[in-house]
Amino acid sequence: MRTTAEVVMGVEELVEVVLPGPVEPEGLEIRRGTVPSPGPGEVLIRMEATGVSFAEQQMRRGRYYDQPAFPFVPGYDLVGTVVTTGEGVEPGLTGTRVAALVKVGGWASHVLVEAADVVPVPDGVGPAEAETMVLNGITAWQMLHRKARIRTGQTILVHGANGGVGSVLVQLARTAGVTVIGTASARHHDALREQGVIPVDYRTEDVAARVRVLAPDGVDAVFDHVGGRSILDSWQLLAPGGTLVSYGTASTRDDTGSKQWPVFKLLGRVWLWNALPNRRHAYFYNIWAGQALAKSRFRARLRADLIEVFAALQRGDVTARIAAQLPLARTADALRLAESGTIAGKVVLNP
């Protein structure tokens, strides 16, 4: 059996997937090197599962609004086992399976993470299952319970109900006793109906008109990752007292020009709508909001919400929607699959 020291001294090799610039998936590069050692307050995680989210699809085009300069290692979240700990970290954490939200760096065999940012994965939950619940689960939980503050008996509209975030969101909402209308292409409608979701085909139907038929008095909340013109319809579909949660600009993924401008436009609309004398509310959700001003509070909230999501997974309130699992060496294939629009759930990468 290899010891922790042997691993860190280079018996195991560091493998990273590098995004060198705005490239097609085949332009991703594999970089190899020495496994790093954790510094004070850090842990070294051997990755067991990481994922392909919409953020990476934007990043490879240079379209994610606050991505780092090229080249860099993408990977928004990961699950893995703590190999060793740095100074000031409880040594007993070694050998523990943990989850972490990192924004970049997750597409690697080994990742350094601040110990304060890791959350233990409950016993009995596999790495791929847990991975689908990190970014997607926290996002869904916070939008439902911290922003929209949904209540039993309400009706909500979820755009992209078959996607990574959407699939978790609709399950959490149904568990809370909420009626869910979900947009998706027709191939996903049977699966949505099985979950108690009312499906609407965004490709062949007038979504706004159909939702008005289903909810004549408006919906209590809309969760919109599309942006662009969709956000205008989403606002108009709200009932008095309703809440719009915008959390992306998917419609601008293939656009050119400023990557910040679509976000600035959304923020401007949100500010204007909230300034109007009406009973409706709008938010632009950013999972990193508050980190810079109150890091300890941000971490505590993130930890608490991920623990809630893992508990829901253990109870069976939500099921991990894994579209496919591919090895890190096939990240290009994984990225193409995630971008194809043909899958339900999340594409997971393994070592």
Image (tube, rainbow, N blue to C red):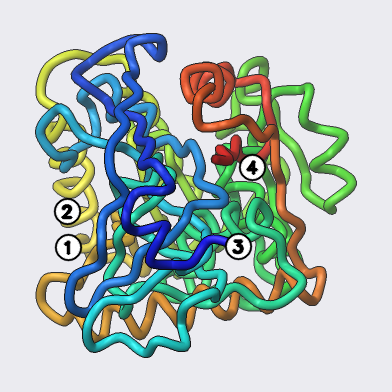
Name the mark on residue 161. Answer: 4
Amino acid under disc 3: Met
Q: Quadrant of residue 201?
A: top right
Foreground: 268 or 298?
A: 298
Marks 1 and 4: which is nearer the front?
A: 4
- Residue at 69 percent across and 47 percent down: it is 181
Residue 16 position, x and y percent, is: 35, 35
Name the mark on residue 47. Answer: none
**10 Å crowding of disc 1: few (<14), some (14-19), many (20+):** few
**10 Å crowding of disc 3: few (<14), some (14-19), many (20+):** few
Q: Which residue is mark 1?
A: 275
Foreground: 91 or 284?
A: 91
Going from N to C along the chain, the mark reached first, 3 or 1, is 3
Between marks 2 and 4, how big is the CA–CA gap?
A: 27 Å
**10 Å crowding of disc 2: few (<14), some (14-19), many (20+):** few
Between marks 3 and 1, how big is the CA–CA gap?
A: 63 Å
- Residue at 46 percent across and 39 percent down: it is 53
Amino acid under disc 4: Ala
- Residue at 67 percent across and 65 percent down: it is 173
Q: Which residue is mark 3?
A: 1
Q: Which residue is mark 2?
A: 272
Task: Determine if residue 176 is in view.
Answer: yes
Going from N to C along the chain, the mark reached first, 3 or 4, is 3
Mark 2 in CB contact with mark 1 (< 8 angstroms): yes
Marks 2 and 4: which is nearer the front?
A: 4
